[in-house]
Image: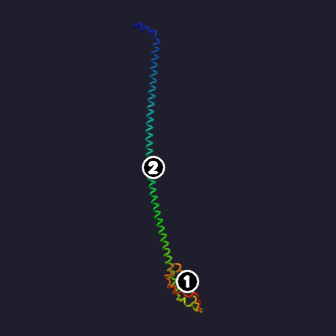
């Protein structure tokens, strides 16, 4: 085929060739446009993936910070609980020591109270003995019936002696005052003469 034959062939098929070239150009344009859309979508997808990865890493960083803060708070609470336990144990030991001290003070108070009662009883007995002595009455000697003052002194002395004897017995002091009691007991039966 020579050039003339080729031109004739092209002239006969010119329309087909133009259609073929236009179709090919359209296909290439369509493919180029599809690649361009695909490239844009790929770029958009890449941006979204990058944004997601950035958000994911920020979330992980935030999660790690939150976990760290939570661990710090837990540690602070644990320290405070330990300090509270120590203070509670200290308070319990102080309370126990105070309870022991209070018991000791109560026992001392009871002892002092007993000692004070004994001292008070002793003072009262001594005052009564002084009163008894001031009366100058001998309980072994019955008073004269005609002497009303003597009978009154005798009865007063007998009452004072009875109080002395009772106080000595109540406070377990009969041994201390046994000489006085035995010396001034007098008679059980009183009869004036």
Depicted 187 relative to depicted 100: above or below: below
Depicted 118 relative to depicted 7: above or below: below
Classify mark 2: residues with Cα within 10 Å, few (<14), some (14-19) or many (20+). Answer: few
Image position, residue 85 (x, y; %): 46, 56
Q: Is residue 74 visible?
A: yes
Residue ID at (44%, 54%)? 82
Question: Which residue is under mark 2?
Answer: 74
Depicted 49 relative to depicted 87: above or below: above
Depicted 71 relative to depicted 11: above or below: below
Task: Tell me which colouring the rendered structure shows.
Answer: rainbow
Q: Is residue 1 left or right of residue 147?
A: left
First in residue order: circle 1 vs circle 2: 2
Residue ID at (50%, 75%)? 114
Residue situated in front as seen by the camera: 85 or 4: 85
For mark 2, give the secondary structure: helix
For mark 1, give the secondary structure: helix
Question: Which residue is under mark 1?
Answer: 162
Tell me the CA gap for discs 1 and 2.
80 Å
Q: Quadrant of the N terminus?
A: top left
Image position, residue 170 (x, y; %): 53, 78
Q: Quadrant of the C terminus?
A: bottom right
Image position, residue 187 (x, y; %): 56, 88
Image position, residue 152 (x, y; %): 58, 88
What is the count of numbered marks?
A: 2
């Amino acid at each position: 085929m020579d050039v003339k034959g080729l031109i004739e062939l092209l002239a006969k098929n010119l329309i087909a060739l133009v259609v073929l070239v236009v179709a090919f150009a359209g296909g290439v344009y369509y493919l180029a446009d599809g690649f361009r859309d695909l490239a844009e979508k790929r770029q958009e997808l890449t941006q979204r993936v990058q944004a997601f990865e950035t958000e994911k890493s920020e979330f992980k960083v935030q999660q790690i910070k939150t976990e760290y803060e939570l661990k710090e708070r837990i540690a602070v609470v644990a320290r405070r609980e330990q300090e509270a336990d120590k203070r509670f144990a200290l308070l319990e030991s102080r309370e126990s020591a105070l309870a022991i001290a209070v018991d000791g003070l109560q026992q001392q108070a009871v002892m002092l109270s007993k000692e004070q009662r004994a001292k008070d009883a002793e003072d009262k007995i001594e005052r009564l003995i002084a009163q008894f002595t001031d009366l100058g009455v001998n309980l072994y000697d019955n008073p004269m019936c005609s002497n009303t003052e003597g009978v009154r002194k005798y009865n007063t002395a007998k009452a004072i002696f009875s109080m002395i004897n009772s106080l000595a017995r109540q406070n377990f002091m009969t041994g201390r005052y046994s000489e006085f009691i035995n010396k001034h007991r007098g008679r059980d039966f009183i009869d004036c003469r």
